[in-house]
Image: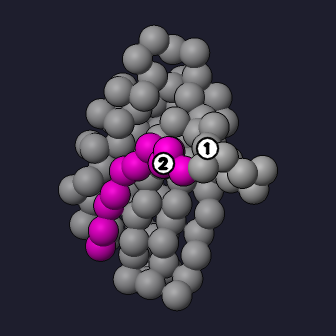
Amino acid sequence: MITHSVYFYLSDEPDAREKLIEGLEKMRPIESVASFRLATPAATTERPVIDNAYGVAAHCDFATIADHDAYQIHPLHVEFIDTCKHLWSDVKIFDSEF
């Protein structure tokens, strides 16, 4: 199983969070995605090791690396990047295998 975790740091665009979530939701039907979850920072106790400056996180699970790779080039994913990249100022991606 591969988990693709993407943390979006929002741009100054008005309503960036809502627009980004709307754009992310359009990728939900991608066939190679086994699980698709969106999240926002939790209201946990502040500690120096916690980065909660991001605005939205997307977590996608894939059964195989091939499924992950198919997702990366899927037209809905490519369209999401093209139409929504102005909504984030930075993005961090963590891919994990278990």
The residue at the point 29 percent across, 73 percent down is 34
Residue designated by label 2:
42
Secondary structure beneath disc 2? loop
Tell which residue pokes out farthest to the top in this image: 14
Residue indicated by mark 1: 52
Residue 25 higher or lower than 23, as above or below: below
| Image height of 34 relative to 51, above or below | below
Magenta stretch in the rendered image: 34-44
Picture coordinates of residue 83, whole percent (x, y): 42, 29
Q: Residue furthest left?
A: 29
Would you say the residues marked 2 and 1 are in contact, meaning their CB atoms lie under 8 Å apart? yes
* Quadrant including the N terminus: bottom left
User: Which residue is located at x 58 percent, y 39 percent?
Assistant: 54
Lateral position of residue 53 relative to residue 60, left or right = right
Question: Disc 2 and disc 1: Cα gap in Å?
Answer: 8 Å
Amino acid found under the numbered disc labelled 2 = Ala
